[in-house]
Amino acid sequence: QSIVICAFSNREGTQMTNATQKMKTKLRRRSKVCGSSCSCTVKSFSAAAFILIFAFSSMPSDAFAPPTILQSPRWQHHGDNGRKQHQYRHPQLVSPPSKLHLVTNIATETPLLTDYAPAAASLFNNMKLPAAVVTAGMISLGFATRFPELPRDTLDKVYPQSLRAQCAKLERLHIVLGLLSVTSELIVVLWAAVAVNQLTERAYDPALSVWDLIHRDCDLAWSAVNSHYILGIIGFTGMLWLRAYVMLLGASASKSLMNAASTGTAAATCLMVSIVNRGVESGGGTSVDRYGDTILDLFSHYAALLLKVATDEASPGPLQLSAMVLETASLCFMFHVLITESDASFEDQVNEEDSCPIDAYDVLTDENELSKLTKREVEKLKTCVDLGEEEEKRQRLREWVLDEDEEREEEDSGDYASVNVSA
């Protein structure tokens, strides 16, 4: 501390100086006493703190901790046949858990059961809307618009018949692939809509998670929606590749450009399958709450569930079993055609029953032969005769046009010759 002395006179200054010296002497004496006592006090406090720290660290539990209120007083609603009952709960005083048993208490906590039906309905809606959009795109691409064709032969470019036969084969494959993809996506839309209605109308038991509810009550619907959605997307990608391939052929694209389009489509397909594989592998977040590791596990799980439900003795599903058999037969027929049918075999086939006979007019004029035919065969012969007459008329018209063109060219050449001679 600083002491300011204001001296107004010599006498007062001398008195103030003596008082100051006396005060300094007293302070020095007190500091010596306080220093010795403070050092003793610090040593005693240090020893006491060390003893307390050692005692608390060696204690097995927090026995001296004050009790804490875990739950505050509140009103709870309990449903009983649609009626709400109010019950007042008093606050509970519970001592804090032991340090040694804290991890055990956390691990043994009972998980809460919650109503996850709205969340499950939201998941089905997430699948229904994209499936509807993809279905609209496939219908417009596969059936509303015509499949691309190769241009007509010209003097600059003549396409071989084998290539035209191959494009015709791809067109037929495009139709079948589009049909299977559209129906697959329609199954997604219908099944998701029914599942959402069921989740909204019915009262489901509480579950641990959304996956727990779906796996327990909507396992078949969820696996079916995912499986058919993926199949439809892959089929849609195949339709795009078929159309792009024929369009590149018609545009006289190089092989490198066509290979680039094919490899790009294959890369997109591989990435989509990989995304689904990762989703199937993660599942509900654990190694137990999932369908498997790959997309094949998802398909096999769906097929097994569908077969189990279809052959259930309590509630059999004959239509579901018929759908499985018919779908298998459809895939077998399609793969059989793809494997056995060559590029030009279908185009070279001529069905004599569908073609018109050469002597159709003679058979119609002969009463004996006409009496041996059925009504359908007679109508076919009449149609063939009409088509033959129309073809003869078109042929005569083409010949007449060619003759007129030749005469006009001769007249033009004669006029030029006369002009040159006169000149």
Image: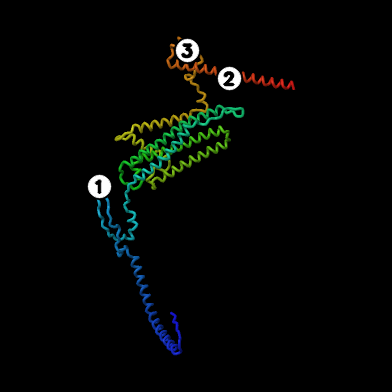
**Vertical arrangement, residue 345 with respect to residue 282, above or below:** above
Residue pictured at 50% horizontal, 18% vertical: 387
Which residue is tagged 1?
83
Of the numbered discs 1 and 3, the one sitting upstream in the chain is 1
**Element under label 3?**
helix
Of the numbered discs 2 and 1, the one sitting upstream in the chain is 1
Tally the numbered discs: 3
Which residue is tagged 2?
398
Which residue is tagged 3?
364
**Vertical arrangement, residue 8 with respect to residue 276, above or below:** below
**Element under label 2?**
helix
* Three-letter amino acid code at the position of disc 3: Leu
The quarter of the picture where the N terminus appears is: bottom left
Residue sitting at the far bottom = 11
The answer to which of 26 and 418 lies nearer the viewer is 418
Of the numbered discs 3 and 2, the one sitting upstream in the chain is 3
**Element under label 1?**
strand
Residue 261 spot, x, y in % from top left: 53, 38
Q: CA distance from mark 2 to mark 1?
A: 90 Å
Residue 299 spot, x, y in % from top left: 40, 38
* Three-letter amino acid code at the position of disc 2: Arg
